[in-house]
Image (spheres, helix red, strand yellow):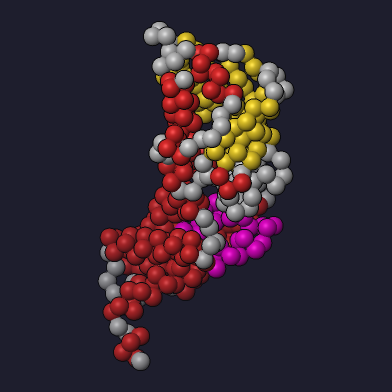
Amino acid sequence: MKRFFHSPRLRKLWPLLVGVLYGLGLRIGFAWDHGEFSIVSKAFLLATPFSLGALAVFVAARGERSTVRRDAAVSAKAMLLFLVAMFATLLEGLICIVLVLPVFVVAAVLGGVLAGWLHRRMLDNKGTVSAFALLPLLLGPIEATLPPAQSEQLVSTTMHIAAPPEVVFDQLADVRGIRPVELGFAFVHLIGLPKPIAADMRGTGDGAVRVSRWEKNVRFEEVITHWDRPRAMHYRFHIPPGSIPRDALDEHVELGGEYFTVLDGGYDLAPAADGGTELTLTTRFLNKSQLKLYGDLWGRMVLQDFHRSILGLMRHRAERA
């Protein structure tokens, strides 16, 4: 038994397990307390992976020579294993895992490299290790006292369609029976965002309502605010309570949820020189998370990808018509 606990394989595995257990403990704790702690916060999304990487390296460095490359590898492996554990235990969905992956890995490696540097200078005493372990718990209450940060972002995407504006506009108003092949490849659908299956227009002109239905029983409304055939169709989003099932989207990226919501948008059509149409799809969204810059970046990337998928569908149908 003693030989087992001192085996090289266990010495490599133990730091990773310490990192995973530490991360899971904080993930559960942050979700349990909705007062001073929040999952979508700098304390969890930045400080937790930073401390996780550091703790894994502190454990791995005991009795072994530490190098920057080794420290980076240990912290990155511990973080990746933690992300797999969150997905396997259903604590997070694939969408959230993919969104946080870059910042989690970078923060963990930075924490691991710093921990290795402290170890090589004999500064990794009990107080130092405890400070790293408690860092997210100390930052959480401080961050909770800060005023909420909100950011409005406007995302526009344009695609050329070889059909006149009148034909294109008529395809926008009523979109039924969307087949997956018509949407083409989209990264957002690959990581779990439901695909649209229909958009039924009820009425015409200002005040009409287009009901958008997606996979997983997602349903919301687009209330027409400006109708000018064949130049423009603008709308505001109306997401009634319960219209997006809890299992359809992760709560941290749910439309109309606590952290992100879409406000309004629309289509603008301009005649092209070749007789076709320049079709522009615009969406305005609100980022209510504490990670303003990172949330804005991902929100824009996700919407751009989704826009290209929808515009591709419009081009396919209008050109066939």
Q: Is residue 59 covered in magenta?
A: no
> Percent position (x, y) of residue 234?
62, 22
**Residue found at x 55% / y 51%:** 42
Give the extent of the magenta segment.
Answer: 25-49
Q: Quadrant of the N terminus?
A: bottom left
Q: Is residue 186 left or right of residue 131?
A: left
Image position of 197 with respect to 11: above or below: above
Q: Nearer the viewer, residue 243 or 294?
A: 243
> Percent position (x, y) of residue 39?
58, 55
The reply to whether residue 295 is visible in this rendering is yes
Q: Nearer the viewer, residue 144 or 98?
A: 98
**Residue found at x 46% / y 42%:** 188
Q: Is residue 234 left or right of residue 78?
A: right
> Percent position (x, y) of residue 80?
40, 60
- Magenta span: predominant SS is helix
**Residue found at x 53% / y 13%:** 166
